Amino acid sequence: MNIRPTEGSVRSADGTSIGYIKLGSGPGLVVVHGSLTKGDEWLPASSALANRFTCYLLDRRGRGRSGDSVEYSLSKECEDIKAVLDVAGSEPSLLGHSYCAICALEAANRFAVSKLVLYEPPLPIHETVIGQAFEDFRAAVDRNEFDEALVIALRDLVKMAHEDVAGLRRSPHWSGMAALTPTWTRECEEVKQLDFGVARFAGVTSPTLLLVGTATARHHIEASLALERTLPNVRSVQLQNQGHQAHLTATAEFVGAIEDFLGEPLRHEGSASSSQL
């Protein structure tokens, strides 16, 4: 069994090199991280999954092991995901977190995905999730004041509690997150352009698991509720007393929900959700 991580890369449709970490044994699972981080953040959860699945931890373009391009779009993110899915074996599953849960959902709306796991996509349902604070954030990035930009983003965009921001600022993760703030501006621009609601995803037939913390931001809950009502083959699982980082703060519970879902035989008919958000 190959639990020890190895590295690989693949070319996306526009020629950009997309790097990934591979570990584990069994059916393929492509993991796509959220904003302000890299694929390495998912090593704890993926190491726990590696006894049953071969995990491919993609480094999204513009960070880590991957290259970048002058032009950026949600479509390019979908192309990058497709490139890694294509090397992940027969009928790999796809897991996306936060902004890249949106990317994963958009990908499943464009091409076949075996199974889909979405952890709190910040989709705009009734109003924008990118408010006036985004301009303050972008201005701080333009001044190369990345620490200040990250505080603004976490406090005013993610709606993280003051004490949680302070705790994160003391952690070893802070400097790496701050360095990635310029990449978040273009992602926020993509979210700003999205239509309200989720009706466009009604044709996504991939069996889908929605993971959402009971202590997360309200707009994450609203988006998952809307998807629960719209997707034809969906299950919802609450992560009790967890927020937007449950893969790190409640790894065993998080992994258990994914293992239960991915371990079930494929079904292509509609299914009722297993829990209410």
Image (cartoon, rainbow, N blue to C red):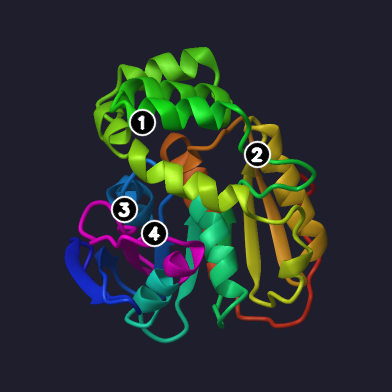
Q: Name the residue under label 1.
A: 141
Marked residue nearer the N-terminal end (1 or 4): 4
Residue 177 to residue 29: above or below: above
Question: Is there a contact, CB below 8 Å, between mark 3 and mark 1?
Answer: no
SS of the residue under disc 4: helix
Question: Is there a contact, CB below 8 Å, between mark 2 and mark 1?
Answer: no
Q: Residue 49 carries which label?
A: 4
Which residue corresponds to the image point at 43% horizontal and 65% vertical from the top-left?
Answer: 77
Q: How crowded is mark 1: few (under 14 residues within 10 Å), some or many (20 or more)?
A: many
Residue 84 left/right relative to 64: right
- Closer to the camera in the image, 232 or 28: 232
Q: Which mark is residue 129?
A: 2
The amino acid at mark 3 is: Gly
Inspect the magenta stretch and tell me whether residue 216 lies in it.
Answer: no
Residue 272 left/right relative to 91: right
**Residue span colored magenta:** 49-78
**Spatial distance from mark 1 to mark 4, Cα to Cα?**
36 Å
Residue 159 is drawn in which quadrant?
top right
x and y percentages locating residue 201 in the rendered image? 71, 68
SS of the residue under disc 3: helix
Residue 59 is drawn in which quadrant?
bottom left
Q: Mark 3 points at which residue?
A: 39
Q: How crowded is mark 3: few (under 14 residues within 10 Å), some or many (20 or more)?
A: many
